[in-house]
Amino acid sequence: MDPHLLRTFLAVAETGSFSAAAEQLRYTQSAVSQQIAALEADLRTPLLTRRPVALTPAGERLRGHASILLVRLAAARADVTRAVAPPGRLIVALTPLAWHPALADALALLRTESARLTARLRLAERDQVVAAVATGEADLGLVDGFTAPSDPLRLPDTGGARAIGVAESPAVVAVAASHPLARRRRVDLSDLADAYWIDAPAVAAHTRLPVDGLRPGLRYDGQDVTVLAGLAAAGHGLAVLPEPLVTTHPSLTGVPISAPRLVHRVELVRIPAHLTGGEPAARLAALIEHR
Amino acid sequence: MDPHLLRTFLAVAETGSFSAAAEQLRYTQSAVSQQIAALEADLRTPLLTRRPVALTPAGERLRGHASILLVRLAAARADVTRAVAPPGRLIVALTPLAWHPALADALALLRTESARLTARLRLAERDQVVAAVATGEADLGLVDGFTAPSDPLRLPDTGGARAIGVAESPAVVAVAASHPLARRRRVDLSDLADAYWIDAPAVAAHTRLPVDGLRPGLRYDGQDVTVLAGLAAAGHGLAVLPEPLVTTHPSLTGVPISAPRLVHRVELVRIPAHLTGGEPAARLAALIEHR
DNA sequence: ACGTCGGCATTAGCATCGCTGATGTGGACC
DNA sequence: GGTCCACATCAGCGATGCTAATGCCGACGT
């Protein structure tokens, strides 16, 4: 079960093909085949079916563990390696809906303080944001999600990163102003099970949420919030969105949600210890937290 | 950073000696030396000082990560491997103070239900209990600790095990009946900073707790609660203990704690999924949880 | 101050592991 | 039933990582 084999296993699980995984990892197909065989021999359990290549139940379980383990390994390496972070660097990873003008303000302030600062923002999916912070690829992360008021987000286990809530706003159902629903004072999400929803996994883990079994509607694979809002405004389907975002958009109406109780929450992700000093990341974190 | 090297590193960190670690792991001293060198080369950081052998700051950090990683690795292996648990086995790991008569009752009930049951109890320290459950060495764990009322225990990150609170009782300061403190109605722990405390790490993570900087008194390295109570009764020092235990003991008096607000809490540790069926572990867990 | 001892580092040699490249094999699809 | 595609298997070889022997250096004693 060395990490090498786990990485290969994950690549096969993702691509669904030995040869594709081999290419991705710059191995020969033979090597991948042998590595998977070694892993299965080690665990005395078939992890994959061949023809077609698919995960067995044991493989499913291993996949979950393996992805966590690899992130933690990378996090450990990063944590030990980074002696003193290069002081002029600041990389912030964030999910699209975690964006907030306060971030821009804080960054601006930081840049006036230290002219030499190389700041960089990176948009990514939620798990990737957390992983990036844990592994040191990013110095700070901002993630969002929908939960019950003042409940923390349920983030994936990844490295030693810690999350602190920094903002909450009401969650509303975004509909086109012309939509019949737009005249409603409030809605119960479970009443909307039959409606069409826009599924935009790259923008938010769940724009159709968190009642299971909602009807799949249009799927949008981009990361741009404007496009998503535009799609909703054009009547392509409903989406649960933070209220401030919806009110900004002229042709969108936000309908408050009566049940379940739901807010849009943004959390700041950071490594506890390291950033104690006056590094830009620590400064920015402080600015955002105590806004 | 393969697990092999991490294991060796941990052994060196624990024993404080390359040769001792080598012996423990059935390697030659040369191999250990080379492995540590490889690890340091890989991370481009000295992890240990030699002569005397001690952890550098980077080494300290790695130690924390490594122990977590190895447990998670073992947990992953156990989770994938255990296809169907041998139905006649039930191993419960617990910390000394997590013991509760209800456990005995539940076990008794279980044994009448299935005569073939091989039940086994294992006493261990808290981290080891959690690790044992995560790695599948134990089917169920019971851990205890002191926290604010209805706060969960702060358990070490280990594997995918989950903890559920099953019991809480008031925390009191245990003193000999003859002790002047025994006449007090209540005490503030921070007022007792100057008192002598019994330090019994093998019984409870903190019998002197959770105010930092309390004065070290007698140290007891055994696991037996009776001995600890006896030491307190004999006036060797104070200890924070769960109230039921103290009232049981004739010559001990329990003084309620006014601040900080503190309870003794017992949590059940188990693997979420697997034990869904009618396995003894699932039965026992259900019995304890819904008592 | 110097010698001795104990413990980590270094080196040589060798077995094993894990990769590549070539070839084998079986299911799917026409 | 043939062909093709993708995974399995095999031979060979370089790299890895171990043991055993030896070197080296700081601590401690006289």
Image (spheres, coloured by chain):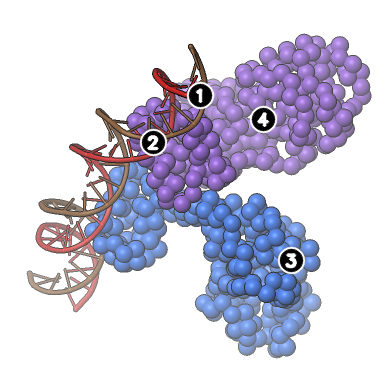
Chain colours: A blue, B purple, C red, D brown
In the rendering, at what x and y percent does residue A184 appear?
76, 79
Subunit ID for the residue under disc 2: B
Residue depth check, mark 3 versus mark 1: number of the one nearer the observer = 3
Secondary structure state at the residue bearing disc 1? strand
Residue depth check, mark 4 versus mark 2: number of the one nearer the observer = 2
In the displayed structure, B152 sits above or below A228; it is: above
CA–CA distance between discs 3 and 2? 47 Å
Quarter residue A150 falls in: bottom right
Residue depth check, mark 3 versus mark 2: number of the one nearer the observer = 2
Name the residue carrying label 3: A288
In the displayed structure, A68 sits above or below B265; it is: below
In the rendering, at what x and y percent does residue B183 appear?
92, 18
Residue depth check, mark 4 versus mark 3: number of the one nearer the observer = 3
Asked if one can make out residue B276 in the rendered structure from this viewpoint, the answer is: no
Name the residue carrying label 1: B119
Label whose residue precedes the other's in the sequence (4 or 2):
2
Secondary structure state at the residue bearing disc 2? helix
Residue drawn at 76 percent across, 41 percent down:
B150
CA–CA distance between discs 4 and 2? 32 Å
Residue depth check, mark 1 versus mark 2: number of the one nearer the observer = 2
Label 3 in the same subunit as label 2? no
Name the residue carrying label 2: B32
Subunit ID for the residue under disc 1: B
Residue depth check, mark 4 versus mark 1: number of the one nearer the observer = 4
Residue drawn at 39 percent across, 45 percent down:
B38
